[in-house]
Each structure stands twice: as C-alpha cells, then as structure tokens.
Image (cartoon, coloured by chain):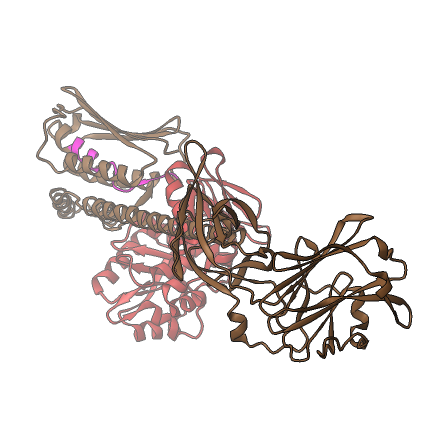
Chain colours: A red, B brown
Amino acid sequence: MMRAVLVDDEISNLENLRILLEKHCTQVTIIATAQNVSDAVDAIEKHLPHVVFLDIQMGEQTGFDVLRLLPTRNFEVIFITAYDQYGIQAVKFAALDYLLKPIDIDELMTAVHKAEHKLAAQIQTSQLDFLLQQLKKPETHVSTIALQMQSEIRYVTLSEIIRCEADNTYTHFFLSGNEKILVSKSLKEYADLLRPKGFLRTHQSHLVNPKYVKSWLKEDGGILLLTSGEKIPVSKPNRETVKQALQRLW
Amino acid sequence: MKKITFILLSFITALSTVNAQKGIDFSRTYAAGGKLLMSVDSSAKNVYYANVFPNQPRTSFNYLPDVNNVSIQIYFKETDSVQHYRYTILEDDKPIVVNKSIDQARLADVDRPDEVFRSTSLGVFPIKGKTITTIIYSIEKPLNIDKAVFYGKLISRAKILGFSKRFATDKGVDYSWITDLKEKTDFTFTEKDDELTIVKDRSVNDYLYYITIKDRQTNKIIFESTAWQYGYYVEDHQFLPYVKIDKSLFKKSGDYEIIIQPLIEWTECRDCDISAEEIEGYITRHTLSVTVDEVNYTKKELLLYSLLVGFLIGLVFLVIIYLNKRKNKKRLAENEQQKNTAKLQLNSIRSQLNPHFLFNALAGIQNLMNRNEIDKANKYLSKFARLTRNVLDDKELISLSQEKTLLDDYLQMEQLRFGFEYEINHSEDLDLANIEIPSMLLQPFVENAVKHGISQKATDGKVIITFSKQANDLQLTVTDNGNGFDPVKKTNGLGLPLSESRIALLNSIYKENRFTLAIQSTTNGTKISLTLIDWL
C-alpha cells in the first residue's frame, strides 16, 4: 500500500491521474490532492505520503516550491511535466523520475514500481536536497550529477568523470581515482545530458570528458589518448565534430 | 716621423768650444745627422733638425727656414779611420767641395766623460735661400753614404696635378684623367673602375711629403702613404710622383679629403715658434667627392644587413603565419556557420510533420473515445504525444531505438486509420540503444509509403522497415507493396522532395560520411534504401 498525494493546478489533470492510478496502479491509495503550493505543503505535512505526484509548472509557482517549503522530505517524488521546461534538466541531473503529459500508462507503471522498490528497500537518498541546490544556480553552472546505482545514489562532479562507455542499455562511468560505476541508463541519455557540458561523443559507445584528453592520435583514422593512458576510438561520423571541439579547447 | 737620436745628440748642449767663428755667435748646436753637428747663428729661429724619412735611412734633413748661417762640424770616434773618409759639399746642386779628405792636422780632441772624439769644422755657410748638402763616406764602405741636407729655403707646398682612374676594357685596362683641378673634384667609381691615381708635382725632395686621405663623414684616415712612385706620368721630361689607391678603400659615396704635407715634426723642435696658420701654409688640401656606383659592404654592414633581412623575412613569415591562422579561423568559422545554417534548415524541415496526418490522428483518437475504447484512446494519445514531442524536440541525433519507437508510434497511429500491417526489423549486430542517426530521418519515407503505397490497399497493405549493418555502413530501408510511383516524377506530397533536400543538407553537415538514397519503384511496390556510409 502506497499512500500518494497528487499535486497539479488543473482539476482535469488530477482527475485523469486519479483514474489512471486507480485502474493501473492498484497498490497506490490517493489520500489527498492539491491544486496549489500551500495546499500541497499542508496535505503532505498532514498525511505524510509515501509518494507525491508533483506537477512542475503551477501558475506562477512550481512544484519545486512545494519541496522548498517542506522541512523534511521523507517521500518519493514523481515529477510531471507537459514539455521540456524549467527544471527538467535539473531533475534529470538528480536522477529523479518524471512523467510527461499526457501520461503514458506504461511509463506511469514503471515509475510507480521504481518508487515502490525504493521504499521497500528503504533507500535513503538526498536527491531532493541535491535537486533544490542545483536549482539555485544557473543551468550552465551545474557541475554535479546524481548516478542511480543498484542500491544507492552516487553524486559525482563532472570534472571527476573521465569517460563513459556504453554497455547496451547500461553505462559504465570511469572516474578519476580508478573507480568504475555501472548505471542502468543508456549512454545516449547521458550523452544528451553531458554534451552541453562539453563532453564529447566520440563513438556510439564512448563519451569522453575533454579535460582528460591528452592527445589526438592519427592511427586508425583517429584515437583519443586520455591522460589515464586509455585509448578511445573516434568513429568517422564524429571525427569532424570532435576535432573541432578539441581545436576550440586547445 | 720620429727623429732618430744620433750618437752625438747626447752632448750637443755641452758644446761651445768651436763657436765664435767669423765673428758670428754660434752658440746653439744641434745634431745634424750622421757624424755631423751644426751650429746656427744666435738670431736663428725654428730649427727642425735631423728629420729622417721612410726609405731614406742615411739621409737627414735639417729644415732651417729662419737661419742665416750654419756652421757644420764633423766628429769622429777614436776608433774611426779618419784617413778613409771623403766628403763632398754642394750648394744647391753645385758642388763646392768634392771628395775631399779630412785634414787630420786640424782635428781637435773633444773630451767627454766616457769617450773622446776628434772633431773638425767642414765650414760655415750662409744658408738663407740656399740648400747645403753634405755627402760623407768612408772608402772602406763606399756604399754607406751619409747625406745631410741643410735646407734654408721654404719647403714648397705640394701641388696635385691630376687624378686618373683605371678601368677595365676588352683588351685590358685604360685610364681616364682629370687634370684641370679646382678645390673640389667630383669623382665617380663605376663597376669597371678599380684604381685611383693621385699625381703630385715634382720637387727636389719628394720624400719629404706624405699623403693622407680622410673620410669626411667619419673623420677617419683611410689611407696614408709616403711611398711615391715614379712612372708613366711624365712632365717636362721628368717622371712625376704618384700614389695608387684601390677603389675598395672608398666604401661609401661621399666627400674625402686628400692632404699632402711635409713630414716635418713641427712641434718637436728647439726654439720653435710656428703658428697653426704657418703650418697650414705647408699643407695641400683637396676634396674628392666620390660617388660609388657599386655598393661594397663591410663584414659589419653585411652582418647588419643580413640581420635586417633575416628580421624582415622573419617578420614576413610571422605575418604569413598570422594571416594563415586568421584565414583558417575564418574558414573554420565559415564552415561552422555553414553547418549551423544547414542545421537550422534541417530543423525547419524536420518539424514539418504533415498536418494532415496530425489532425487525422487526433480524429482517430476522438473516435476511440466516442466508441468508449478508453485504454486504446490512452495508448494512442501517448503515442501521439511522444511523436509530437520528438518532432518538437530539436534534437539533432536520436538513437536507433528512439527512431524505432518513433516509427512504431507513427505507424500505429496510421494503422488506426488504415488497417495495414507493418514490421520493423533490425539485424542483431546493431547496438540500437547507442547508435545515433539524425532524427526524423525515416519518417517522411514511411509516411510516403503509407500515403502513396498502401492506403488504398487497406488490410492487404504492408510496410517493412529494416535497419541493417553492411560492413561499416548503416542501411535503412522502407519497403511497401503499394502501386509504386515514378521516382523521376515529383509527387505533390511534401515527403519525398523534403527528404531529398534533407539528405543534401545532411551531406553538407557530415562531410566525412555520405548519405545515399536509392529508390526502386515497380507496380508491385516501392523500396527506399537510405545508406549512411561509414556510419558504424
């Protein structure tokens, strides 16, 4: 049994979510709904839910304001947003779950299962604190990413990531200090997140932090030699882009 | 030229023994060269005694312009064999005594603290306006002739008679002359010229004169000589003295001063009273204004010039590098701009999802709602949202699995309208999650396949999409079993022409990889093959 609070400023969205949850996620019990920030804070403080479905954009305010106003946040949050908008990038960097409107039933069920798993395993995370911290700075200053591992969340500064390597739908993170982390998200998703931060997608299976690139070797059409001594292939479609990016840096 | 101290000089001052002859007070005595001493009358001034000259080791020259009478004495050491000596005296060029022996009876001893000399007078001579020359030798060594000149005239100022320059001709060399001289002479050295000759007038004692050449710009003496030559330059049946100067001495064009003057130490004399103006009266000066056509460089200049040239070359090199860098940068920027433009165009094309499809899809969902097929309506609505999101996202690249989802969504929406079948197949060796392709690459072709290929065929229609790996190439195909079309004839739908311009844009962005499009269309169907060369 998961107690849930639904927060959205549109009544039709609340109704829709209620219907979908009642029909497809029977383990969820809706104990309260709220249409603005203060009601949401009250409801959460009063009912102490396991999970909060939180719309990001609510008129002039945001779902993040709800979180800011709560001193303790002992619940899972599933964000809901209509379209890539303010904060969604931070949500992604914090490795938090989010749903897009209109809600896809499969995605809803997956998100609920994940929350359930985390509650059952009693994984304590500080992802929400991290998210709120990230939101304080401009997006370009975000320098830390949360990595969801099997049973913990790791916060990693971007500058300690040497490179990422795809392993099917998993991604290996190679960190400075010879550490290796396996994360259950595809490299493509991290590439989308980290490319704006200067990371180079050199190959379909490789994402490289340019900070750790020592030199460009011309063998086999192009290989990056990293300061760690590793050699990373640069595939032909990416060659020009990588070259230009490095030229700008050097 | 320094005076040479003769052996007798040491006791000149002490001598007063033989002085008062013919009523003249010869109280001042000087070394006169060789074994001679001379005494001059008390009114004498400016006695320049015992000058010697280069290449004239046994000649001494006494310049006595202000002396009336001179008394000449000869001194012998005790070891000298006086009987072997002979002397000749000339007044100007007229001999008055010739090869006479010394009258030994008249020799008187002169005691010196360390040595005893024997001395006698050779006579007292009025000297004003005259030259007395003595020639003394021993018959034991007749070649060692000591000559002393007592010069009572004024030394004449030398005169430059002319310049000539030597130049190369076909046959050898020839000379050209400048003889009518003013104070200044313009002189040009061409490449063929190699030598300057300066000719002086003939005098009785040419050895008296020395010539110097001074560079007016640096005030440095570049040439000095006493070595007069006598040769081809003849005037009045006499050879004229001349000096030759190599052209290389004149390094630069400019004024040079030629100075000819007697080699007399004007300041080193006894009882001298000669002014600078008087000295200047003995000096000949002439300005030679030289133009050097061919520039000769010294090592220092050469070094300086080569440094300068090196510096200039370096500068030019730097400028070239800089310009090149700037050009490269500009080219890079232009390339980037071009790419950006292409990307922008691509974006605008990408977002042109057929509105006809959009609204029909919405109508399809409305229909499901009205038929109370809620789950189905939810499903299609999600698909529709995801599709629209993909189109709105201006993501340049999406993974193959995202492309597969997108096509699934799209085809299922279309299935709702037309009941055809479709398959999306991919070869096992493709890493769908991580291989990226430009987004919305296949959708227009698939839309085309649905619209023109099979929409009339309803449930019999079939669309097959494949992703496959061909060596390093990624091949994407869309096949339908519709009625086909003429690929040459442009269809009125947006799909195909847009796709073609998209491929052209993609080719301008991904220069290293080519996108090729092949269309095969028959009445049994159409197959579109899109190959991304070297993509994997």
Q: Measuring from the top left, give residue B361's x and y in whole percent.
A: 15, 44
Is B38 drawn above or below residue B20 in the view shown? above
Identify the residue shown where x is 31% and y is 47%: B331
Q: Measuring from the top left, give residue B225's x and y in whole percent.
A: 58, 55
**Where on the picture, by quarter, is residue B535?**
top left
Where is the N terminus of chain B found, in terms of image quarters?
Answer: bottom right
- Decide which of B300, B306 is in the foreground and name it: B300
Q: Is residue A90 visible?
A: yes
Q: Is residue A150 visible?
A: no
- Decide which of B480, A9 is in the foreground and name it: B480
On the picture, is B3 further left or further right than A39? right
* Magenta stretch contains residue A122: no
Where is the C terminus of chain B found, in terms of image quarters?
Answer: top left
Q: How many marks?
A: 0
Q: Measuring from the top left, give residue A160's x and y in whole percent.
A: 52, 56
On the picture, is B12 further left or further right than B176? right
- Decide which of A85, A140 is in the foreground and name it: A140
Q: Measuring from the top left, give residue B433's x and y in whole percent.
A: 39, 40
Which residue extends farthest left?
B492
On the picture, is B281 further left or further right than B512? right
Is B365 drawn above or below residue A3 in the view shown? above
Identify the residue shown where x is 58% and y is 45%: A229
Is A95 drawn above or below residue B196 in the view shown? below
Which range of residues does the magenta coloring cover? B435-450
Which residue extends farthest right?
B114
